[in-house]
Amino acid sequence: MLKIGTKAPEFSLPDQNGQLHTLSSYQGRKVILYFYPKDMTSGCTAQACSFRDLYPQFQEKGAVVLGVSKDSVASHKRFEETHGLPFTLLSDPELHVITAYDVLKPTKDGKPSRSVSRSTYLIDEDGIIVKAFGAVKAKENPAQMLEVL
């Protein structure tokens, strides 16, 4: 995990509609950047649906919710449509952003991992990491993030 107080790494990733998003385009807004392992799995669906259910409250607090996984744009689109997700899902199949944010799970045998650890960052209006949570619980994480806002 990256340290609180550090500048969040810039990124440019496509969303579920193929539109590119950069962190700098959200300057002036709080960003909840959450990393998850895989679309349509039980834990990831529970987490996404909890963010969906609380989304109006995140908006009231002026926060943007961005989910990131290594899944494809097409997979994200299916995930969004299946569960009625109102927020942006970013596709990082090359693991550039996932690596930059240090959210790959360590392996026991020392080999490079391609597994994403469920982790969440709160980034302030100036692009500084103000909260960082690793190994979060899928169902509890969205409420936890709302509380820290």
Image: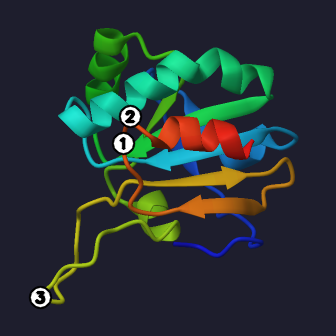
Residue position for label 3: 109
Would residue 43 appear left or right of 88 to someone viewing this image? left
| Residue 139 versus residue 134 in the image, above or below | above
Q: Quadrant of residue 40?
A: top left
The residue at 22%/72% (across/down) is 113
Q: CA distance from mark 3 to mark 2?
A: 29 Å
Say above or below: 105 vs 46: below
Residue at image point 44% right, 26% down: 50
At horizontal 76% and vertical 47% (from top left) the residue drawn is: 24
Q: Earlier in the sequence, mark 2 or mark 1?
A: 2
Q: Residue at x 83, y 44 (%)?
A: 27
Which amino acid type is shown beneath numbered disc 2? Gln
* Residue of label 2: 47
| 3 or 1: tag closer to the N-terminus | 3
Mark closer to the chain start, 3 or 2: 2
Q: How many marks?
A: 3
Residue 39: quadrant of the picture: top left
Residue 138's disc is: 1
Q: Are marks 2 and 1 in contact (CB under 8 Å)?
A: yes
Viewer can see residue 109: yes
Q: Quadrant of the C terminus?
A: top right
Tag 3: amino acid: Asp
- Left or right: residue 111 versus residue 59 is left
